[in-house]
Image (cartoon, grey):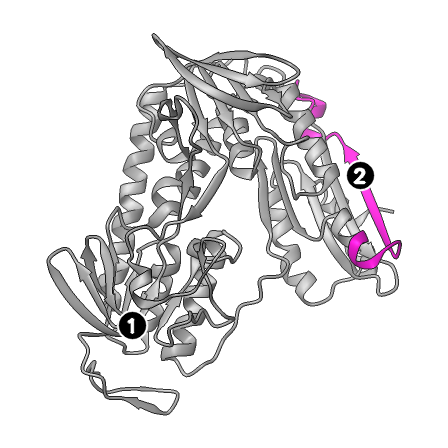
Amino acid sequence: MSSDCFLRNGLLNTMNSDYDLIVIGAGPGGLAASERAASYGAKVAIVERDQVGGTCVVHGCIPEKLMTYAASFLQFFQNADEYGWGNVSCQFDWSQFMKAKDQHIEHLSQVHIKNLQEAKAELMYGHAQFLDAHTLEIGDRRVTADKILIAVGGRVVKPALPGIEHAITTRELLELVDRPDHLAIVGGNHIAVKAAGIMNALIPKVTLITSEEQILPGYDDDLRSTIQTQLSRLGVQILCRSQVQKLEREQSCIKITVSSDAVDEISATTVAWIENRTPNLEGLNLEQINIDVDQGAIAVDGYSSTSQPNIFAVGDCTLRPHWTPVAIASGRAFADTEFGDQPCAVSYENIPTVASAKPEAATIGLTETQARDKFGDAIRCYRKTFQPLFNLIGESKQEAFLKLIVEQQSDRILGAHMVGEYASEIIQMIAPAMKAGVTKKHFDQAIGVHPSLGEELFTMR
């Protein structure tokens, strides 16, 4: 199908463009949109200035998950003796792991490149900026498209503090060549909490510094308390209600001046700043094409359309939830709508999310506070705390925690929150049930797999 004659929703496009679609950004959303649009016969190009795969594959979710697996061995090694395996060495080779991790990420990046090739989507490398609503400049090349999708993701923002140049971000943290002896993490969101739990199993000391009253603002209060308590028991030093004033390099360490009730100064090998992220819009030249921006993000409607009728946006450069599956779903929905004659809007309600990695914790739906704000006293909460079977022989004392939030009149499950092994696998399977209107009675009537953590969701009274 030629780019100057494209049929979409019964309307013939006669614009003489180089491409039917150009996607800026080869992260999850951009890749999903490119491959889906190409499957409909569109002539597609995708532009990337970094490694193909985006933040998730290269600098975020995947390396983080691989590091979580590495950290998981500690629990088994510590309990090996009780389970009959004798004493197992707990020495972690940071360099060996990082090398293996980098090789796997490169492999995944190449897989995505191959997928683009098989979809017949052209991959371009370089920085893209708008010249007009249909024209992009990529290096010394100018290209035109009927439609353009912005999928550039987000980036970490560090504050203007004295010595802030000594702090790294999550990107550098996941690429450290040398293992830090003491890592100080500034931030209390899920990214910071996951990093703290993972690194605590791999390095001698971790300190988590947050200005909040408690870690994980916005999450269910019981979940937050459980995770914070368990992190502390595992050895993470947590400083709440603490503001970093400045950083100073002192030989091999960084001195952190803190406004806190607990301490005034901390000396760490490495400081990772993991507080705020912002859409990565710098250098796109959006002002040239009058794209509406809301709170620093590209404003879009339910179909990912911007204020320019032929320009769209998905992923972390919008105000939608910043999760990889959201970007993928949005990218595919965009392609279905614009090139597949299948108008599709994504529902962003009840998205399962991981709040912590070590201990593992996941959540879906409303928190208790949100539910009470919406339904008042017409809700009922079910809680359960117990020792998993694994702990009955081993030395581990981490408790599992489950919580269900129910609207009494309809008996519908409004929220589910869990701390424990496989929490992410268990909680995400509640998502389709909640979309179908699952009730507490359905849970009560279900029969689980024994012995398992998930079965406890069906025994809560």
Q: Is residue 449 visible?
A: no
The dot on residue 38 is 1
Q: Is residue 79 magenta?
A: no
Q: Which residues are magenta?
A: 372-397
* Label tally: 2
**Residue 252 screen position, x and y as percent:** 35, 9
Quarter of the image for residue 398 reads top right
Question: Residue flagged by tag 1: what amino acid is it?
Answer: Ala
Please state which of residues 212 and 320 is positioned toward the viewer in this rendering. Answer: 212
**Residue 352 screen position, x and y as percent:** 60, 52
377 lies left or right of 216: right
Q: Is residue 160 visible?
A: yes
Quarter of the image for residue 361 reads top right
Q: Which residue is mark 2?
A: 384
Q: Is residue 396 magenta?
A: yes
Q: Residue at x 29, y 64 (%)?
A: 288
For the residues labelled 1 and 2, the Cα–Cα distance comes to 49 Å
Question: Residue flagged by tag 2: what amino acid is it?
Answer: Lys
**Residue 339 screen position, x and y as percent:** 36, 79
Count residues near mark 1 (Cα–Cα under 10 Å), then give few for <14, some for 14-19, many for 20+. Answer: many
Counting residues from the N terminus, which is met first, the one under dot 1 or under dot 2? Answer: 1
Find numbered disc 1 in the image and state the secondary structure of the residue it sits on: helix
Q: Which residue sits furthest left?
A: 140
Above-or-below relation of 319 to 270: below
Q: Residue at x 55, y 28 (%)?
A: 197
Quarter of the image for residue 286 reads bottom left
Q: Quadrant of the N terminus?
A: bottom left
Find numbered disc 2 in the image and state the secondary structure of the residue it sits on: strand
Count residues near mark 2 (Cα–Cα under 10 Å), then give few for <14, some for 14-19, many for 20+. Answer: some
Q: Residue at x 45, y 70 (%)?
A: 333
